[in-house]
Image (cartoon, rainbow, N blue to C red):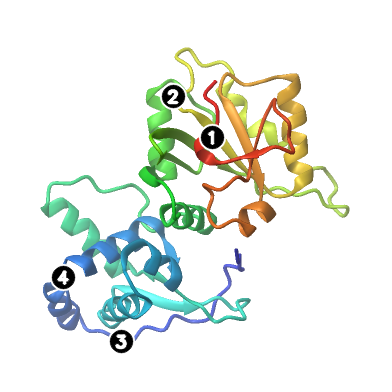
Amino acid sequence: MARHSRLRPHWSMPPVTAAQRDAALHALGPRHWALLGLLAEHGVLDTSQVTRLLFDSRPTAVRHLGTLVRAGLVGRFVYGTDRTHLASYEATAAGLRAVEQRLRQQGRPVPAMLGREPSEVNEFFARLAAAPQGHLYRWRRRVDTVTWLGDHDIRGVRPQAYGVWVEQGVAVRFLLHVDHHEPSPSAETPPPPPARALAGYRDVPRGVPVTAILVLARSAVREHELHQALAVAALPVTVAATTWSRYGQAVSPAEAIWSVAGADPAAHVRLAELPAN
């Protein structure tokens, strides 16, 4: 799994007049709108991710993306650190306005903070949605997840997403946390312990309404620290962790890459095998 700096060259996007953009909007088909909505909701997606999520072939995906780029609704760029020169795409301000207007015309709610999903969350979503086995039945973005948890009297936590994964008749409802911290010898102070981000789940009046909390740990050291902390003070919900390394080497997040807190940390299980607490 490639992770690149957010620094990027200028967008590849031809100049488009308002009249040309309006004409292009009227000519968009259902798959163009689905693609624009996907980019508006998830921020940045690359060509491979778009192909896996919406299209049967890469040429078809590129053709639809090209239509949106020429209309000024989507920008195309390549990360400066990506030696493969894989193209990434992001909805422009005009594209976001078009999606918002279309949703309002259809009487549908407009998601908060369109186009601002972190790239690592996009990657997790895209890889899980394209997994060869199972089905990503539901996905909530960060803002919607925090609001939903607040309705369950759970506050002070910041999960990146909520999802429901279904495989062979088993449904796993999960919250995704991404650990961005990594110990550094040059740092004046150590990073906060990984379990601190989960403290808000400890004392909740109605329990945590998920099967498991997933933690994507920056390193094996951080994963070990998390397991140690939860062995001393367990949470009232299953917690499973994986490292960036295991995650990147797996076909998808549904694979046997998750170590369950309180169990043998060397025994990695599939997402559908996570036990409910």
Percent across and percent down for residue 44 are 44, 64
Q: CA distance from mark 3 to mark 1?
A: 51 Å
Q: Amino acid at mark 4?
A: Gly
Instruction: Residue at 54%, 34% (x, y): give it.
Output: 273
How far separated are the C-alphas under marks 2 and 3? Answer: 48 Å
Q: Are marks 2 and 3 in contact (CB under 8 Å)?
A: no
Mark 2 highlights which residue? 209
Where residue 15 is drawn, which disc sits there? Answer: 3
- Contact between marks 3 and 1 (CB within 8 A): the answer is no
Mark 3 or mark 4, which is nearer to you? Answer: 4
* Figure quadrant of the C terminus: top right
Residue 29: assigned label: 4
Q: Is residue 191 visible?
A: no
Sequence order check, earlier mark of 2 and 1? 2
Residue at the front extreme, as displayed = 168
Left or right: residue 263 versus residue 15 is right
Where is residue 201? Give x, y as percent. 56, 24
Determine whether the residue tagged by mark 1 lies in a helix, strand or loop.
Answer: helix
Q: Where does the image place residue 110, in percent across and percent down from the top left?
A: 25, 48
